[in-house]
Image: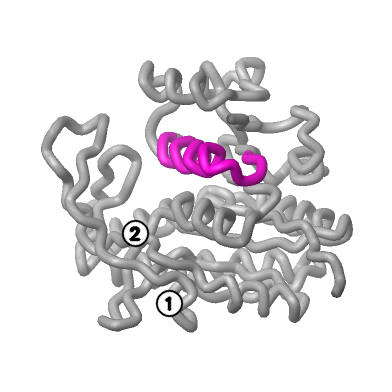
């Protein structure tokens, strides 16, 4: 029996799709991992694209604790922006770099089984539970289906919807959450959270304040004091749950820099922020 290739799960933020340099770098960096004998799965959301389409349709984006509240109307917009615009853009960027990106979404074949999230207390939003609407929590990930795609030599590019197969009902799911669940289920050696911000900074916008390595306890302190804020909160929180479970290594970085993914795989700390338990 042949030895299983190492697996990298790459979660891509919608802001990356807005940058030609980031898109080109993503394809090159994924190609480099594959050439170095890694299997790769790409996960993505599409927050900026969803918000832009909501605005064109006269809808208002609502976020609490960095997470999107999703009405039934909003869910239609999510499927159009995320499963359409963003998924196609990422698949094409990979193909342009010689990588066989295979676009799909969490409802494809029941890839991501989910249920509606119950009202949840959000630490930064007070004691009352928040109903996030058509937002789901992951129940299971179809490992056999994903490994089958990898065996065919393609890179799954997964738009992170979930589905209740019994109800035939889709849900919006935070892409960081799905990336963590797929990394955990498949035992990934590496989870890369790719964002235009490119890491955790003491002062956002000042590259000299980049934090190269961040422990779990230090990360929680930075969330508490507001240094880590907004959409970076769920990224770091989900990464911490993965580390707490003892799975792989996690890095937050951007895709534009040459050899960024290879650097994260080696753990040399040259780029982005590497989170450790």
Q: In x, y percent, where is residue 16? A: 58, 50
Relative placement, left or right, of 29 versus 219 is right
Relative placement, left or right, of 44 versus 248 is left
Q: In x, y percent, where is residue 198? A: 61, 36
Q: Is residue 238 magenta?
A: yes
Question: Which residue: 36% across, 74% down?
Answer: 163
Q: Say if 63 sits above or below 32 in the image.
A: above
How far apart in space, not on screen, are marks 1 and 2 (Cα)?
A: 13 Å
Callouts 1 and 2 close, C-beta under 8 Å = no
Predominant secondary structure, magenta span: helix
Q: Nearer the viewer, mark 1 or mark 2?
A: 2
Between 17 and 13, the residue placed more toward the observer is 13
Q: Quadrant of the C terminus?
A: top right
Q: Could you say which quadrant of the image residue 65 lies in?
A: top left
- Which residue lies under the disc numbered 2? 137
Between 26 and 140, the residue placed more toward the observer is 140
State which region is magenta.
233-250
Q: In x, y percent, where is residue 187? A: 63, 56
Label for residue 107? Answer: 1
| Residue 17 visible from this viewpoint | no
Q: Quadrant of the N terminus?
A: bottom right
| Residue 274 visible from this viewpoint | yes
Question: Which residue: 20% across, 33% down?
Answer: 125
């Amino acid at each position: 029996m042949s030895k299983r290739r190492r697996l990298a799960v790459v979660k891509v933020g919608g802001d990356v799709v807005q940058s030609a340099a980031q898109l080109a770098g993503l394809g090159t960096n994924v190609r480099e991992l594959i050439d170095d004998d890694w299997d790769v799965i790409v996960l993505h959301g599409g927050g900026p694209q969803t918000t832009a389409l909501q605005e064109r349709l006269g809808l208002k984006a609502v976020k609490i604790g960095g997470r999107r509240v999703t009405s039934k109307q909003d869910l239609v917009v999510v499927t159009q922006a995320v499963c359409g615009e963003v998924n196609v853009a990422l698949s094409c960027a990979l193909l342009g770099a010689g990588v066989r990106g295979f676009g799909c979404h969490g409802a494809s074949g029941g890839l991501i089984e989910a249920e509606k999230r119950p009202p949840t207390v959000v630490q930064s939003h007070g004691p009352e539970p928040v109903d996030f609407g058509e937002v789901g929590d992951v129940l299971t990930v179809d490992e056999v289906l994903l490994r089958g795609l990898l065996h065919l030599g393609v890179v799954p590019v997964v738009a992170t919807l979930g589905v209740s197969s019994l109800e035939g009902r889709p849900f919006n799911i935070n892409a960081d959450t799905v990336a963590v669940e797929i990394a955990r289920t498949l035992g990934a050696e590496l989870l890369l959270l790719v964002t235009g911000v490119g890491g955790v900074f003491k002062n956002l916008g000042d590259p000299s304040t980049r934090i190269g390595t961040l422990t779990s306890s230090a990360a929680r302190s930075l969330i508490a004091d507001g240094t880590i804020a907004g959409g970076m909160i769920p990224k770091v929180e989900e990464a911490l749950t993965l580390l707490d479970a003892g799975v792989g290594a996690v890095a937050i970085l951007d895709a534009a820099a040459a050899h960024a993914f290879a650097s994260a795989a080696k753990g040399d700390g040259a780029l982005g922020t590497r989170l450790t338990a």
